[in-house]
Amino acid sequence: MAVRDTGAEQKIKDSAKKMFFSEGKLHATTQDIADAAGVNRTLLNYYFRTREILFETVFKEAMQEMGVKLDSVFLSKTPFYEKIEMFIDVFTAEITAYPYREIFLITEIHRQDVKHLNTGPGHSQIFKTFFVEVQSAIDGGILRASTTPLNFTMNLFSIMAYPVIMEPLYRNMFDLNAEQFAENLKTRKAEILDMLFK
Amino acid sequence: MAVRDTGAEQKIKDSAKKMFFSEGKLHATTQDIADAAGVNRTLLNYYFRTREILFETVFKEAMQEMGVKLDSVFLSKTPFYEKIEMFIDVFTAEITAYPYREIFLITEIHRQDVKHLNTGPGHSQIFKTFFVEVQSAIDGGILRASTTPLNFTMNLFSIMAYPVIMEPLYRNMFDLNAEQFAENLKTRKAEILDMLFK
DNA sequence: CATTTGTTTGACATTTTAGTTAAACAAAAT
DNA sequence: ATTTTGTTTAACTAAAATGTCAAACAAATG
């Protein structure tokens, strides 16, 4: 049978991911997405039936991509400090590419009718395992005694993600241009490690 | 002249603030807002002319309210550590009441046409003053030498705001119910202070 | 080269949303 | 009691956005 695959379907998904997750255009319409992809809007319906399904598809793909990458870090047998370093590197790459992905999820969850909120089930177990490791680091004196695995993990996510998301606001508040802000972000890995570890 | 003021205008603003800033319903329509306020949708147009103006109005009000509160902290003559404690208390109250306010701003900024992005001008100067204070704390050995005023401030914002915003996702990822999550948030002030200060 | 199969388009229908208008209404002032 | 002024509503218009459909198209297959 003839399988042509001119790449339109992929172009649409890439375009949607870029608008939603990279550019933060949470109100993008199907027309916006089609235009950015350089295809006719009807193709969105041809490939994905409805706009909702397109949303689900790209979101699930994005979450799964991240899941795979984070798992490769969390499940590795590296010593704790090096593991966190790896995590920072991987997560920084993710958040830089898709700073608004989680925000997209949250706003979709909060929309009138919640249909596709699943972040994937297996995650909870992986974090339980990771939390044991963090607890060992606390008990072993590598981390501050005042922290907990949950707080440690949330802090880590927060410190890496939030500044990237808030860039437009922070640049205004702190009077920084794009270069200055980008330059500062680079200095943060060392800072984060120093802050989290004792 | 007859000034009746049945409170509809205020009800609309409160309803909009609640939907956008508290509940994170960034896609709320004028009908949604009117319904939640218990008024006829036409009243939104009567009082605010357009939906855009309503957005601007509630956002400016919300930012100004926060500005006043933060200024009262930043400009107070309290010693540095106590000042940060005050800040955490004030900001926690703010972020609990309006967790999605800044996210709303960011998504509006990223919308096709950027019209009302002004966060207010005076802020930049206030932060410059605060940054001097932070630098003194670094020089005085109260804060880690590896930090900078900018990083210290962004970390503070991040750690407080992000977990609240991400609650629906984190509860899923970490398998927590609403009570467990709320309980944990309460433990964070001590943790944050311990992490930020040497 | 005709057929099959998947792809793409334009035209249309439907739904949703924002904005307008004129009239009804209610309370205060004259 | 009537006028004035501000408030509220229903009905309507206009625009924007989603979804459907039939026909055109292009490449591989027989």
Image (cartoon, coloured by chain):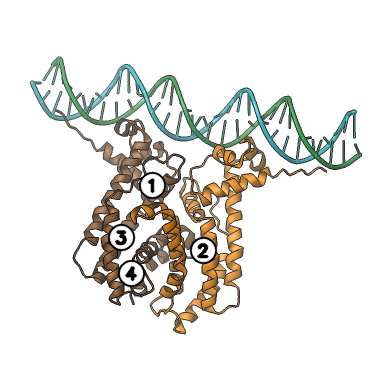
Chain colours: A brown, B orange, C green, D cyan
User: Which secondary structure lies at badge 3?
Assistant: helix
Residue type at numbered disc 1: Phe
Query: Residue under circle 3?
Result: A91
Cα gap from disc 2 to disc 4, whole angstroms: 26 Å
Where does residue B18 sit, x and y in percent of width and height? 55, 49
User: Residue A20, which numbered label?
Assistant: 1
Residue that appears at 29% across and 68% down: A134
Residue B80 drawn at (x, y percent):
53, 78
* Residue mark closest to the camera, 1 vs 3: 3
| Mark number, residue B92 | 2
| Label located before the other in sequence (1 or 4) | 1
Residue that carries the numbered disc 4 in the rendered image: A189
> Where residue B185 sits in the image (x, y, percent)?
45, 62
Amino acid, disc 3: Phe
In 3D space, how far apart are the residues under numbered discs 1 and 4 (Cα atoms)?
26 Å
Return the mark for residue A90: none
Mark 1, Cα crowd under 10 Å, few <14 / some 14-19 / many 20+, is many
